[in-house]
Image: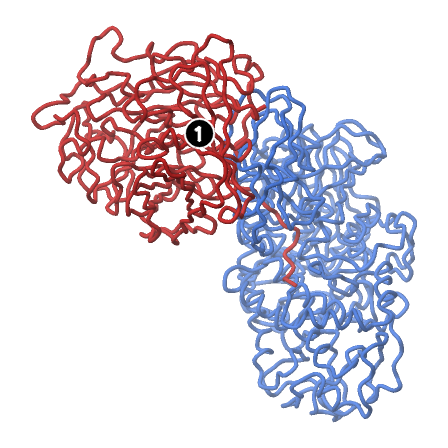
Amino acid sequence: MAAYTGPRRATSTATTVVVDASVASWLPAPAFFRNVSLANASTINPENGLGDQVYHANNGFDGTWIAYAGGAFASALGALGSMVFFSGGNGAYDGNGVVAYDIADRTWAMLSQPDNTGVYRTSTGPTSSNSTHSLDSDAVSDRVGLSGHYIKDGFGNAYAGTEVTGNSTTVWKPFPIHSLCGITYLPPDAGGGTYGSLIVVGHDMNGIRVLSANGKIFRFDLETHVWSAINFPFYQFQIEVAAEYDSFNKLLWVSNSGSNRPFVWSYLTNSGGVLNNPTINNSNNYGNLVYMPLRKIMVTLAATPPSTVTIRYLDLNGYTHGTSSPPGTSVTLTTVSSGNITGSAPVSMLINANGANDKLDYCDYDGCLYYLLRATGGTACTLYKLTPPAVGSESTGTWTWSSEPINQHDGSTTFACRGGRIEPTWGGRARYVHSLKSIIMSDSPSLPVQAIRSSSWV
Amino acid sequence: MRPILHQVRVPSLPKRRREFARGASPAPDLGWIVNGGALSFTEGSSTPFNVAATGPSSYVAGGVYGVDVSGAALPSGMVLTDAGSLTVGSATAANQPGVVFSYFEPGALPTMTLNTGAASGVLPYMATVYPLEGTVPQGAMLVSPDDASLRSSVLSRWPDNSAQVMVLAGAKSLSAFTQTSIRLRPAVVSDTALTTAYIDSLLGDLVVNFGGGAQTFNNWTSGHDRTWWANSQVICARYRRSCGLGVLEAVIDVHAFVGGRVFVEVVVENSSMTTASPSKPAAQTYASASVVINGTQINGSGTGSAWAGGATHEAFRAWYCSGWVGGDPQIQVTHDTASIQAHPLLFKPTASAVYDFSSYVPAGTQFFGTAQKYGDDTYVPWNFGRHRWNGMGNPGDSRTIAYLPQWECSYVQTGSKHVRNAVLASGLALLSFPINYRDASGDVPTFGQLGAQHIGASFPYSGGSPFANYAAYGWDYAHCPAVGMVAFLCRPSPCFLEISQKAAIFNGLGQSNHQFGYWYETRGRAWCARNLGFAIFLTPESHPWKPTARSSLASNVSYFRTWETDPEQKLNLMWGFQPGGIHYRDEDGTPAGFQVSTWMHHFFAVVVHKLAAAKILTGSEQTELAAHADWATLQPVRFVNESTLGEWRYIAYKLNAGTTGGATSNDNLTSIGASSTWGAQRAWNKTDGPPALSGPFMAAGTPEVNAYASGWSVNNGDVEADAENTYTGQLWHALVAAVERDVSGAASAWATVNANVTNLATFKANGGKDCRLHHLPRNV
């Protein structure tokens, strides 16, 4: 018996309510893919009519898509949300503009233009186009200055743990980055602003030296189009990082490979840090993360081809976010027994090394994970599905891989995936969009945006 | 929309128990995730999504789903029913993150009924609700899906700043002689309050004439003492005007409604004085009196005759009149019983009413000295309604005596408009008692203004000493009725709010420190603490009366707690007089040992429990109050659990509670000599062994016989039939309070009583006739 408490009031966790436009005649039928954009992204290339600009580098605007690039689905930007892209660096592209595809309007827009007034490659600027590490390879972070020019060692450590935005002397923009998995979306109710924010986790391919205590997470406010940054003295990210939003706790989680531990940050309380445990230790994989909200787990995959894909997850049930560093309790990393995984994983397409970068996405319609197998310009692609066991049985139940072919909608459209390279595949540039029950994919500024729909997404 | 596949896959996580309405925005139920945090609809679809199927689990079903004010609103046009069915409605393409769904268990959200009379058309109405803590968070208001015009104002707040007392008003198109439900929901809405200039646009002259010449008032815009409440539907403001005879004045409350109707209430008082240097107002004689607003007299004929107590208007007495400008809408607003019975200040009866209050005539009523239907009760100046006007302190189980008087309990039990009528009439009749103090500044005096003044030190008063008052229209601390709280619930009139303040002030005038001390008796401590608590509850947060009233109650709680720590304290019992080693009161000198009216303690335990549950105080003072309520309610628990067998079934008028005493003069003993357990004490008092564990409730008068074998009669808790033998009922409702508090051992005692009282069904059923004592715990 408990003391009388009166009739109780309960509140749910936050829910996103989407009303789809009824005029979705441009969507493919289930089990098909289809072109959906009204124009290609190349039509908004900031270099159009200008010739190569100082930020062109080797690949120009195309570098936003090809340079280990990624994107995020911004659910609150536009009536049905938008796909947002930011990528480059490593000699591919130095333009630091933010690109968005409005899903309802089916049009492209530059949310911010690349900085074009500074000197990018000088004796004090980034000179290497092929470095896999910091562009100046020292221990101090670099940034883009107010006039758009590269500033060596510009960040310093003065703003540890505090988010800083542009002011009269400083613009806290990231240099173009190989976004890999380190890009995600921070919704409005998590501190992202009216339309949410694009989150870009700094690492050493964007000119930000990170093998030091000078890590950065950048935030691009999708309403104000202003960048801000947080400097973390407790940073320990390495080259390939995964950023994923935890909608239950409204936290940003960051993970990467090797022996490093997860990092967590709250934009609502400006608190976070590196957890005590665990280390992800995906020695052959980048730290991919995908959040499964029904279970409150963060899934990360690992594989060394041609072995079976390993499924691991961080169990966030019971995680309490503190305000100190470390910011909260440790979380448990569980490796699913190989005996509890059935079906054929897409091992042949290399869920390893670069291959796993943000290619898995969570479908909140059926609670499964999806992986779109790249098929170069063909008439079909393969959609893999990873069905989890019952909620609460993640470590003991069976995870099942399955797949199905997705065919061209009209008999003539080819699958709009660029050819030639294994590594990028679809990465973060294809995302499940709840309101459409489709994956929206953009793999090149010269190819149309396509919607890909599972046969079960009816 | 396609059926959602994972709507049933809600993890069954442990639920966090919510303290009584703790927090304006309770943390989300960790187990209630609506469809994985995402819902998808298509424009124009009629397929609903059943939010109710997602949770929250472990909550009582049948309540109300909604969109919580702590999150984002649904896309415009979407429809969520009370039962949790969500449809897209007229919404167009949208993406709305951050929607938080809410669920209120049955009883959490009030529903009002508008009972119309002969009038019809668009009619204004006003009402009071007492929301539970957290139901209407700070920043939110109450609105209604049944009346878009309804707006609300917050008077007082819970410690978490959610609304505790709210006044509502609206205007709705209604037919004559109908009942219309108005459901209430919390929401964040913008609202622009009416101002006193609006009153000025509707009212002309108010003229009072008591034979001293016509006194006119018309400064409605700036002549107000205060605005009690205001929103876009109603403004209620306070004015005063001298009546031209001594300090006799009209205290005027104006309720001006959108649409042009105005309800004017006038209390005529002979009370005003400077509290710090008081001078008793001279009695006034007037052969006629008229109160006229906009050319219409609103007081009935003969109200100036001042018939009671002579032909004069004595100091500190008052009478009331009211009238409508623009026509009386004739709406009686009543409440659903589920919500009012869930309130911590109120209770859940053991049975539904057996009477039809549209025709029931209470026996033995003192209303006009004749029996009549509740629905026929009518306030008449100088009348005392159903209260005991002549000899409040007379012995006997008057229907005014209990935590709430009989008719107010019947309103809690039924929500009947007929009973409401009795609550209002007898609520106004309290003005006839000489408790109407008013400081010359305009408000009821504060405890701060009283300072150390008290009746024993010549602070002026009328009607005889309030200690054991048997005089006509005398107010008696040990028998005074509950004041204001239920009446204000039935109609938001500032005069009810001030009556509660007046009673609280008068009750505190017995001692210089305003504690309910030596001469108050334990029941007087209960009644005075209750009325002080009610006044604090009703008084708006910004009102200067509230802070010192809270301090006074806290002072009393500190005093009450001295019983806990007295060296003679063994049995969790408050005895007469006071602690301290020289003033222990043996109430009956005939039998051996120390006798106490435990039923007084039971009354007291119920009062402090309810005040603590309603969080009348704040901070450490509230902590003290709650601790004392735990202590007081432990007595009935120990009484049952420490019995060897069924001694607890036997309750006499005065029970033996110690070994000292027995002399003829025994009011000021220096020891009690209580045993360490009730079982041992009962055994000391009796010559025979304990009665069987199982059997009926038994009662006896005084002196208590020293054996169980004879002198006792079966007591069915029929308060009407056994007017003098309700002591089992008093034990019962104190035990209910203990169970609601879940004090140590309460569950065991409750189980023992329920398993072994053989006339329990009859006992509970008698709550259908009178539920003053027949309560049920709301947590079992």
Can you say whether B15 is above or below A251 in the image? Answer: below
A361 or A352: which is nearer to us? Answer: A352
Question: Is residue B554 in sight in this rendering?
Answer: yes
Question: Is residue B190 in sight in this rendering?
Answer: no
Expressed as whole percent of the image width and height from the top left, the position of residue B42 reads 59, 22
Based on the displayed image, in which of its 4 quarters is residue A126 positioned?
A: top left
Question: Measuring 54% from the left and 27% from the top, which residue is drawn there?
Answer: A18
* Left or right, residue A302 beside residue B341: left
Q: Looking at the image, what colour scheme do you see?
A: by chain
Based on the displayed image, in which of its 4 quarters is residue B403 positioned?
A: bottom right
Can you say whether A49 is above or below A175 in the image? Answer: above
Q: Which residue is mark 1?
A: A371
Element type at marker 1?
strand
Question: Measuring 60% from the left and 52% from the top, which residue is drawn there?
Answer: B539
Q: Chain of mark 1?
A: A
Please name the amino acid that badge 1 sits on. Tyr
B286 or A335: which is nearer to us? Answer: A335
Based on the displayed image, in which of its 4 quarters is residue A366 positioned?
A: top right
Expressed as whole percent of the image width and height from the top left, the position of residue B43 reads 60, 20
Which chain corresponds to the colour red?
A
B642 or A358: which is nearer to us? Answer: A358
Q: Judge the density around disc 1: few (<14), some (14-19), many (≥20) Cα neighbours within 10 Å.
A: many
Expressed as whole percent of the image width and height from the top left, the position of residue A266 reads 38, 42
Residue located farthest toward the top when viewing the structure as drawn = A49
Quadrant that contains the N terminus of chain A? bottom right
Question: Measuring 38% from the left and 38% from the top, which residue is drawn there?
Answer: A307
Q: How many marks?
A: 1
Q: Colour of chain B?
A: blue
Quadrant that contains the C terminus of chain A? top right
Expressed as whole percent of the image width and height from the top left, the position of residue A403 reads 50, 28
* Left or right, residue B432 beside residue A56: right
